[in-house]
Image (tube, rainbow, N blue to C red):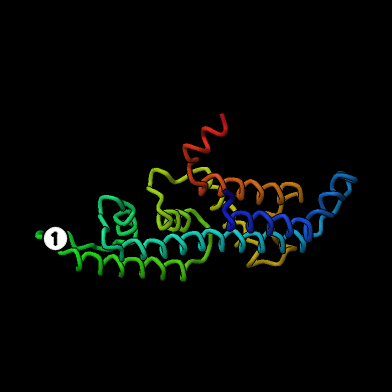
Amino acid sequence: MTDPLIQNLENRINDLIQKFVFDQIEAEKNDPLSYTPDLDKLAAFRLLAHAELEEFIETKAKTALREKIQQIKAADFKTREHPEIFAISNILSFQLPTEHPFDKQKFLASIEQLIKAAEKTITDNNGIKESSFQKLSIFCGKMIDEIDEPLAASLSSYGKNRGDVAHKSTLRVTTLLAPSIEAKSAIDIVAGLKGFFSPPPTTSEQQAAR
């Protein structure tokens, strides 16, 4: 089943390519030697694509944290079944109560405070660079050794280049690429995010694929 969030992201990036880059790609193909790109259009595309990528990752993290709140309120909550709680506490330097004897109510109350701290981190987030992606991925339930390093590097590079466009006149920006490459960079990142956040196939789905 397709994740509606990733489907919306794919649609939005495709829409932005059609509005800001498609005609540039066609012009680039038709006259590669003397073609002059519209830098304002390329800059607008990069800024808007970055915003869509950032919102997608933040929304994934917010959704995961809302689900976590519901899980910890369940009567049968067991810490063994939710190791991601400790990953979140570690990355936020948040000390969970682990003294003996174990006080479950105190522990659950502390987890609620931890989730609120994670939610504030998302609210304060500004960008998709590697450190932000790492935190938000862990909020989504990923473990530190599950972080897709090539994807994180691509996001970090895209975030850095977005800053170049956001704080300079397009006439002085040196990171804008050919239209075809600008479009491909965004498409490749979306594909990477789709693979990273896609749940593993169920047994029935694996059997159906055989």
191 relative to 163, above or below: above
In which image quadrant can residue 107 be found? bottom left
Reading the image, the residue beneath label 1 is 102
Question: Where residue 24 sits in the image (x, y, percent)?
Answer: 82, 54
- Which residue corresponds to the image point at 57% horizontal and 48% vertical from the top-left? 1
Question: Where residue 163 sits in the image (x, y, percent)?
Answer: 60, 62
Q: Quadrant of the C terminus?
A: top right
- Which residue corresponds to the image point at 41% horizontal and 50% vertical from the top-left? 142
In which image quadrant can residue 104 be found? bottom left
- Which residue corresponds to the image point at 52% horizontal and 43% vertical from the top-left? 150
Q: Residue lying at the far top in this picture: please name it.
A: 210
Question: Where residue 113 sits in the image (x, y, percent)?
Answer: 30, 70
In this picture, residue 146 sits left or right of residue 108 = right
The amino acid beneath tag 1 is: Phe
In which image quadrant can residue 109 be found? bottom left
Question: Where residue 201 sits in the image (x, y, percent)?
Answer: 50, 40
- Which residue corresponds to the image point at 43% horizontal and 56% vertical from the top-left? 140
What is the count of numbered marks?
1
In this picture, residue 185 sits left or right of residue 28 = left
**Quick one: label 1, few (<14), some, or many (20+) residues within 10 Å?**
few
30 relative to 87, above or below: above
User: Helix or strand or loop: what does disc 1 sit on?
Assistant: loop
